[in-house]
Amino acid sequence: GGEKNNEPESSSASSEQIIPATISKEKISLGGAGNSIDIDKLLSS
């Protein structure tokens, strides 16, 4: 992870985080709870 100090891109980064979150939810629905574990690991890495 990286830290940003007073950068306007911070607002952009926060909105980008919503995208993978939405995609992960779709994969969880399609694949089941089993896949949600792998997704969480990928996001954490």
Image (tube, rainbow, N blue to C red):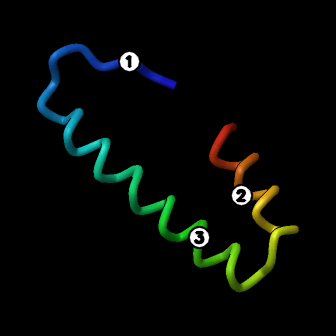
Residue for point 87% across, 68% down: 34
Q: Residues within 10 Å of mark 1 (few under 14, many from 20)?
A: few
Residue occupying the far right of the picture: 34
Q: Is residue 42 left or right of residue 24?
A: right
Q: What separation in Å lies between label 3 and label 2 (alpha carbons)?
A: 9 Å
- Measured from the top left, where is residue 13 in percent x and y? 30, 42
Q: Which mark is residue 39?
A: 2
Q: Which mark is residue 25?
A: 3
Residue for point 23% across, 33% down: 10
- Measured from the top left, where is residue 24 in percent x and y? 60, 66
Q: Is residue 13 left or right of residue 26?
A: left
Q: Is residue 38 left or right of residue 17?
A: right
User: What is the secondary structure assignment of the residue under circle 3?
Assistant: helix
N-term mark: 3 or 1: 1
Residue occupying the far top of the picture: 5
Q: Residues within 10 Å of mark 2 (few under 14, many from 20)?
A: some
Q: Are marks 1 and 2 in contact (CB under 8 Å)?
A: no
> Which mark's residue is nearer the viewer, 3 or 2?
3
- Measured from the top left, where is residue 35 in percent x and y? 81, 68
N-term mark: 1 or 2: 1
User: What is the secondary structure assignment of the residue under circle 1?
Assistant: loop
- Measured from the top left, where is residue 5 in percent x and y? 23, 14
The residue wearing badge 1 is: 3
Give, as a three-letter code, the residue at label 1: Glu
Residue for point 41% across, 62% down: 19
Q: Residues within 10 Å of mark 3 (few under 14, many from 20)?
A: some
Give, as a three-letter code, the residue at label 2: Ile
Note whether 28 is above or below 9 in the view shown: below
Q: What separation in Å lies between label 1 and label 2 (alpha carbons)?
A: 23 Å
